[in-house]
Image (spheres, rainbow, N blue to C red):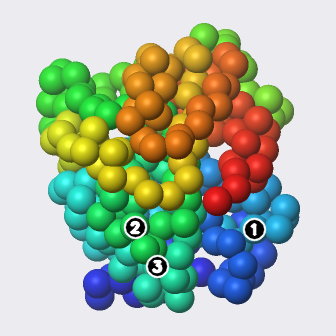
Amino acid sequence: MEVMVNGAPVYAHTGGRPLDTSGPVTVLLHGAGMDHTVWVHQSRYLAHHGQSVLAVDLPGHGRSGGAPLESIDALADWVIAFLDAAGVERAVLAGHSMGALTALSAAARHPARVAGLILLGAAERMPVHPDLLAAARAGDPLAPRLIATWGFAAAGHVGGQPTPGLALIPGSLRLMGRSGPGVLGVDLAACNGFADGAARAAAVACPALVIVGDDDRMSPARAGKALAALIPGATVAAMAGAGHMMMLETPVPVSKVIAAFRC
């Protein structure tokens, strides 16, 4: 489906079923340099297991127009504007990496609009290595290569994709290669500049779940568990053998955990 947000067209994938705002709605928020396709399994699974889902392309990503936003708080406020445009009063926000920081900030800043929070590959702070940030800002192809290398656990480097015919690292590189000029640099700078994770976590008033990959080298599992400890009442689910890109590495377990989350 497409809606207009702040004067720009926005695309959101509904998992193959029409959006029904009379029941629970889960909004899936992608990470830096990516788009809704990273949720390809989860969006379809949720849509066919009794939930309405919106896997949205953030501004300047995928099929959405506009420019990428330069801060996590700006992204959080944009998500609320997107809910308004989609006719959704309250939603569960499930975010990965940059999308997780966005969901966390939205839950703290707009508690009346967030019914539940699911954070994947997240930490209180997510500083970006200076070399990676410099490469992304320069549009150097080294940046997506570094992310693809660090983002997948060992199995992902030797054909660990459970779906026949799909390759994790080449697919990830193609996905980030579709980003417009400068998008990855803006995204990583937003992650690097977010310093209020602890305060935002403490302010969360809705049920929360933190999903960690036990072989995540970008946001280690211990950092995800530490973040969960800062969120009142939050629980943790660990994905065995998964790295930072756990939605793609262990798609079925991640989908089932998200589907089982209750507010």
Q: Secondary structure at mark 3?
A: helix
Give me the disc on residue 111.
Answer: 2
Above or below: residue 117 compared with residue 86: above
Where does the image place residue 257, in percent across and percent down from the top left?
A: 73, 42
In this view of the protein, can residue 149 be seen by the observer? no
Dot 1 and dot 2 residues touching (CB under 8 Å): no
The quarter of the displayed image where residue 128 is located: top left
Image quarter in which the N terminus is found: bottom right
Mark 3 or mark 1: name the one nearer the start of the chain.
1
Q: Which residue is mark 3?
A: 83
Distance from Cα at disc 1 to Cα at disc 2: 21 Å
Q: Residue at x 59, y 32 (%)?
A: 236
Number of residues whose C-alpha sits closer than 10 Å to that of mark 2, classed few (under 14), some (14–19) or many (20 or more)? some
Mark 1 or mark 2: name the one nearer the start of the chain.
1
Give me the disc on residue 51.
Answer: 1
For the residue pair 219 and 16, the one nearer the viewer reads as 219
Q: Residue at x 69, y 19 (%)?
A: 240
Above or below: residue 106 compared with residue 160: below
Where does the image place residue 89, in percent across and percent down from the top left?
A: 52, 83
Where does the image place residue 138, in percent across and percent down from the top left?
A: 15, 37
| Residue type beneath disc 3 | Leu
- Taking the image as shown, residue 242 lies to the left or right of residue 63, namely right
Dot 3 and dot 1 residues touching (CB under 8 Å): no
Q: Secondary structure at mark 1?
A: loop
| Residue type beneath disc 1 | Gln
Distance from Cα at disc 3 to Cα at disc 1: 16 Å
The number of callouts visible is 3
Q: Secondary structure at mark 2?
A: helix
For the residue pair 146 and 236, the one nearer the viewer reads as 236
